[in-house]
Amino acid sequence: MDLQEFTQSNTPSEDSTGFRKVNNRLLDVPVDGTVMVKAGSMVAYTGEMTFTGRSSAEGGLTGFVKEAVTGEGTPVMEAEGSGHLYVAEQGKKVQVVDLDREESLSINGDDVLAFESSVEYEINTVGSLSGMAAGGLTNVYLSGPGEIALTTHGDPVVLTPPVFTDPDATVAWSANLSPSIEVNKKLEIGQTSGESIQMAFTGSDGFVVVQPNEEGSVTQSQNQ
């Protein structure tokens, strides 16, 4: 294609309202007030915008991953102003979900990209997983109403419990589920694979979202 065709086919429309995927890996967030996004995820913006980092573990907007638990923080930042904010996360695919009032979703802290200011959230740790695995350690409960955006390596799959998942591949689950951590002793013998640690989702209600890639692995399936 020539230069004019290239620019026309890759120029996003700015007449939309609500979260909109420019493509599979880039999110357009119309801002008229405030919105919360993962720190470091901004790639561009139009209009007037200011950014405030929030990493305090107490009160207000807190970091997604508590430093006291993991040794490193993954803070959220508050974007305020008027315009369009474009966010992405290391080439991962963007998934947009609209939560109704009283609907909730629990998401791995590494996979939260953005959420509207109307969405309430709470940080939790997953049981005895602390110190046992890198992924799935800290999860964020998001409660509607409002739009949220999460990221996945490749296309996610939604499974119905009972199901066992690798913590590094677990993206989200319905808030009514409370996973437990199990250790597969057979896989421990003579092996160092992370598959020895599993998240167990029991019951017959709800769902679990997993990605076809382990968050902590060296080779990521970003091109899928």
Image (cartoon, grey):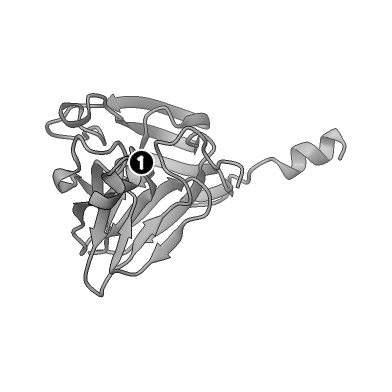
> Picture coordinates of residue 197 (x, y %)?
27, 47
> Picture coordinates of residue 147 (x, y %)?
38, 54
Task: Pick the quarter of the image with the N terminus.
Answer: top right
Q: Is residue 45 above or below residue 128?
A: above
> Is residue 122 at all visible to an observer of this figure?
yes
Q: Amino acid at mark 1?
A: Ser
State left or right for residue 56 relative to residue 206: left
Please name the residue shown 42% across and 43% down the image. Answer: 214
Q: What SS does tag 1 mark? A: loop
Total numbered circles: 1
Please name the residue shown 48% across and 51% down the image. Answer: 212
> Is residue 145 at all visible to an observer of this figure?
no
What is the residue that sits farthest to the left in this orientation? 58
> Picture coordinates of residue 162 (x, y %)?
28, 69
Res. 82 image quadrant: top left
Q: Nearer the viewer, residue 30 or 10?
A: 10
Give the labeled residue for mark 1.
Answer: 193
> Picture coordinates of residue 209 (x, y %)?
38, 58
Q: Is residue 86 above or below residue 196?
A: above
Res. 143 image quadrant: bottom left
Please name the residue shown 20% across and 34% down the image. Answer: 131
What is the residue that sits farthest to the bottom in this orientation? 204
Please name the residue shown 58% across and 44% down the image. Answer: 14
Mark 1 closeness class: few <14, some 14–19, many ≥20 residues within 10 Å: few
